[in-house]
Image (cartoon, grey):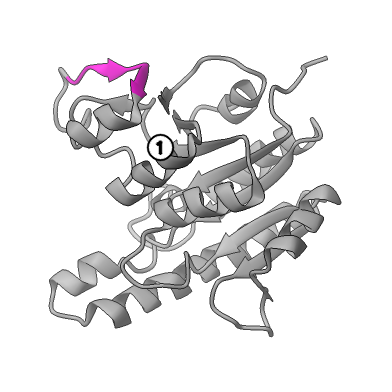
Amino acid sequence: MTIPRFKRILLKLSGEALMGDQGFGISPDVIKYVAEEVRSIFDLGIQIAIVVGGGNIFRGIAAASHGMDRVSADHMGMLATVVNSLAMQDALEKKGIQTRVQTAISMHEVAEPYILRKAVRHLEKKRVVIFAAGTGNPYFTTDTAAVLRAQEIRAEILFKATKVDGLYNSDPVVNKDAVFIKRITYMEVLEKQLKAMDATAISLAMDNQLPLVIFNLKKKGNIRKLVCGEKIGTRINN
């Protein structure tokens, strides 16, 4: 029997990951696949929290660069994460996993408000908790929200799902000679301005010594391998 290395984790999913090959929105096939991957670690008895981005629907920074007010744009981006979180909840519950969505912006008709003690209680009762609407504040990304929530619920590690195998010294899509980085410190990520997560998220993780792993979501079984201690992807710590 496979033995997990962790009791409580936070999984960060980008909104773009849910698009699949589409240019916009949520791919039904992809969200079913992600739900099955989450199910594979849920069955190991791990407590799972999830933060989903909203880039497949609306990206606040991009809109602000085209003249939209940044605060309004970021609030729209937060609402996009709620849409994705509700879709993720539906996919997980179809797999028989009890799930709760908690939002940083109150919208009682569709989700619970974010309350730390309640979130922890859900995790202890073996419910997957999805944190939506980022931090509830403009100018903060969902990467920062993921690190913040991971710290608050005392997750042992944060796994960030991407479309590539981990962190490279340059964009592997653009540069075929990009070098894969197996392990790196928070400070090196900041100094080299690598695009693992935004600087605020990396700094917050560094201040609280939260280990981060960047991995490829597209490779089936990767999440389960990670929680069982296999060294895949890129690990970021001190």
Q: Which residue is mark 1?
A: 206
Residue 126 rendering spot, x and y as whole percentages:
83, 48
Instruction: Point out the residue furthest to the right here.
Output: 125
Alpha-carbon neighbours of circle 1 within 10 Å: few (<14), some, or many (≥20)? some
Residue 183 on the magenta span: yes
Residue at x 59%, y 24% (from the top left corner): 226
Residue 204 rendering spot, x and y as whole percentages:
41, 46
Q: Is residue 85 left or right of residue 212?
A: right
Q: Is residue 43 left or right of residue 165?
A: right
Question: Does 43 appear above or below 125?
Answer: above
Residue 111 on the magenta span: no
The C terminus is located in which quarter?
A: top left
Q: Viewer-proximal residue, 121 or 196?
A: 121
Looking at the rendered structure, the kind of residue marked 1 is Met
Question: Does 65 appear above or below 43?
Answer: below
Q: Bounds of the magenta span?
A: 178-184
Question: Does 217 appear above or below 22?
Answer: above
Residue at x 77%, y 50% (from the top left corner): 123
